[in-house]
Image (cartoon, rainbow, N blue to C red):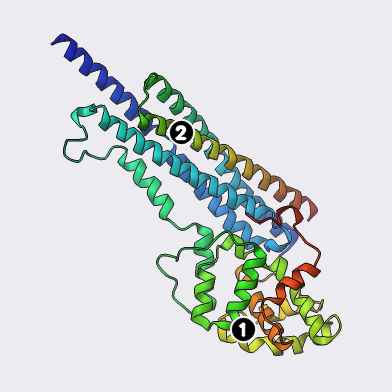
C-alpha cells in the first residue's frame, strides 16, 4: 500500500521530467526564432512558393511550441494543486 | 566572366546561408522535449488513476501533440528549403539534374522517425492490453482511432466486450487511444452503480459484492484471462461502496475491465450498450465544459 509521501515523490519526479521538457521547448523556441530571422533576411524579396511554404511552416512550428509550453504549464499547475491536497 | 564569377559566389553564399538555417532548426531539441514529456505521462499515469485527476493527463497529451506538429512543421520547412535550393540551381543542382543528394538528411530522418515511433504511453497501453489478454505485443501498434467522446468510446467498448471474443476485444482495445481509454473509469464507475441499482432494485451495498462478482467474473476471465484477481473485486466493490476498495489497480486494467463489467450487468438486466446513453443523461455531468468533444 503506497503512502502519501510515495505518491508525492512520484508526482514530483514526473513534474521534474515535465520541467526538463519545458526547458528543451524554450531552447527550441529560441533557436526557431533565430532561424526565422535568418531565413527572412536571406530570402527578402523572394516570391518563390517554396520560400513562402518554408516561412509558413516555421511560423506554425513556433506557434505549436508556444501551445505546447502553455499546455505543460496548465498540467503542472493542476498537478501541483493536486499534490497540495494530498 | 567577372560577373558570372561574382554571381556564382553570391549564389553559393545564399545557398550556404539557407543550408545553415535549415541545419539550425531545433528538431532534436523538440524530440528531446517530447521524450521527457512521454516519460512524465507514463509516470503520472502509473501514479494516478486518471479518473480523479483527469485534467492533468489530457493536458500533457495535448502538449505532446503540439510538439509532434512542431516537428512535422519543421520537416516541411526543410523540404521547402530543399525545393528552393534546387529551384535556384544551388550547388550546381537543378530540377533537370539527376536526383540530388538529400539535404538535411539527418534532421529529416530524425523528424520522420519521431513521427513513426509510438509514444511511451501507447507502448505501455499496448503491452498491458496484450499481457492481460494473453498475446504477444505487436512490433508496431495498429493505427489508433481518435476523436470519439468518452461516452461514445465507453458504449463501443461495452458493446464489443459482449459481441466479440478475446481476439476481437483485444483488437478494439489496441486501436483505442490510451489518453481516451484512461478517461473511461470516470464515466464507467457511476454507470456500473446505476445498473447495479436497477439489478437489485435498490442501490447496491457491500453484501451484494459477491453476487455482482458472480455475474461478471466468468466473462472477465474469458476476455481478460491474465487480469489480476483483485481487479473485479475492487471495481465491483466501488460500485457497492464496499470498504477496502481504495486499492489502486493498474490504470489500464481498470479502463479495459469496466466495459466488460457493464456489459454483463446490462445483460443481467436485459439491456444492451445503448442503455449507457440513458445512464449518462441521468448522471450529473462531470465535465460540462468539454462535453462538446474534441
Rendered image: mark on residue B220: 1
Residues at discs 2 and 1 in contact (Cβ within 8 Å): no
x, y percentage for residue B61? 58, 52
- Whether B245 is drawn above or below A85: the answer is below
Q: Quadrant of residue B103?
A: top left
Q: Residue at x 40, y 32 (%)?
A: B24
Quadrant into which the N terminus of chain B falls = top left
- Whether B166 is drawn above or below B39: the answer is below
Q: Image check: B87 left or right of A15?
A: left
x, y percentage for residue B173? 54, 71
Taking the view exactly as shown, the residue that stands out farthest to the top is B2
x, y percentage for residue B186? 72, 66
Q: Nearer the viewer, mark 2 or mark 1?
A: 2
For mark 1, does the 10 Å Cα neighbourhood hold few (<14), some (14 to 19), or many (20 or more) residues? many
Of A8 and B105, nearer the camera is B105
Q: Chain of mark 2?
A: A
Badge 1 marks a residue whose secondary structure is helix
For mark 2, does the 10 Å Cα neighbourhood hold few (<14), some (14 to 19), or many (20 or more) residues? some
Q: Residue at x 22, y 15 (%)?
A: B7
x, y percentage for residue A39? 40, 25
Quadrant into which the C terminus of chain B falls = bottom right
Question: What residue sits right under mark 2 in the picture?
Answer: A56
Q: Residue at x 43, y 28 (%)?
A: A35
Amino acid at each position: 500500500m503506497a503512502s502519501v509521501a510515495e505518491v508525492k515523490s512520484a508526482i514530483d519526479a514526473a513534474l521534474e521530467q515535465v520541467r526538463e521538457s519545458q526547458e528543451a521547448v524554450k531552447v527550441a523556441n529560441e533557436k526557431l526564432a533565430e532561424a526565422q530571422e535568418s531565413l527572412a533576411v536571406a530570402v527578402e524579396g523572394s516570391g518563390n512558393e517554396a520560400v513562402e511554404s518554408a516561412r509558413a511552416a516555421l511560423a506554425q512550428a513556433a506557434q505549436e511550441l508556444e501551445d505546447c509550453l502553455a499546455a505543460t504549464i496548465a498540467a503542472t499547475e493542476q498537478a501541483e494543486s493536486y499534490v497540495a491536497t494530498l | 566572366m567577372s560577373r558570372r564569377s561574382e554571381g556564382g559566389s553570391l549564389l553559393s553564399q545564399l545557398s550556404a546561408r539557407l543550408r545553415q538555417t535549415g541545419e539550425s532548426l531545433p528538431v532534436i531539441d523538440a524530440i528531446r522535449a517530447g521524450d521527457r514529456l512521454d516519460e512524465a505521462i507514463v509516470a503520472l499515469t502509473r501514479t494516478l488513476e486518471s479518473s480523479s485527476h483527469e485534467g492533468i493527463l489530457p493536458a500533457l497529451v495535448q502538449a505532446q501533440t503540439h510538439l509532434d506538429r512542431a516537428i512535422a512543421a519543421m520537416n516541411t520547412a526543410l523540404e521547402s528549403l530543399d525545393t528552393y535550393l534546387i529551384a535556384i540551381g544551388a550547388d550546381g543542382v537543378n530540377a533537370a539534374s539527376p536526383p540530388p543528394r538529400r539535404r538535411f538528411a539527418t534532421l529529416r530522418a530524425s523528424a520522420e522517425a519521431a513521427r513513426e515511433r509510438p509514444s511511451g504511453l501507447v507502448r505501455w497501453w499496448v503491452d498491458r492490453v496484450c499481457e492481460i489478454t494473453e498475446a504477444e505485443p505487436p512490433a508496431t501498434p495498429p493505427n489508433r482511432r481518435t476523436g470519439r467522446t468518452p461516452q461514445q468510446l465507453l458504449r463501443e467498448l461495452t458493446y464489443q466486450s459482449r459481441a466479440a471474443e478475446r481476439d476481437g476485444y483485444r483488437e478494439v482495445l489496441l486501436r483505442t487511444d490510451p489518453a481516451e481509454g484512461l478517461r473511461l473509469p470516470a464515466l464507467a464507475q457511476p454507470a456500473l452503480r446505476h445498473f447495479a441499482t436497477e439489478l437489485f432494485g435498490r442501490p447496491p451495498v457491500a453484501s451484494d459484492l459477491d453476487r455482482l462478482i458472480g455475474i461478471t467474473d466468468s466473462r472477465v476471465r474469458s476476455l481478460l484471462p491474465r487480469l489480476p484477481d483483485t481487479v473485479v473485486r475492487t471495481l465491483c466493490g466501488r460500485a457497492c461502496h464496499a470498504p477496502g476498495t481504495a486499492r489502486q489497480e493498474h490504470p489500464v486494467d481498470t479502463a479495459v475491465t469496466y466495459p466488460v463489467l457493464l456489459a454483463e450487468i446490462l445483460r443481467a438486466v436485459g439491456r444492451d450498450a445503448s442503455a449507457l446513453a440513458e445512464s449518462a443523461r441521468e448522471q450529473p455531468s462531470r465535465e460540462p465544459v468539454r462535453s462538446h468533444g474534441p
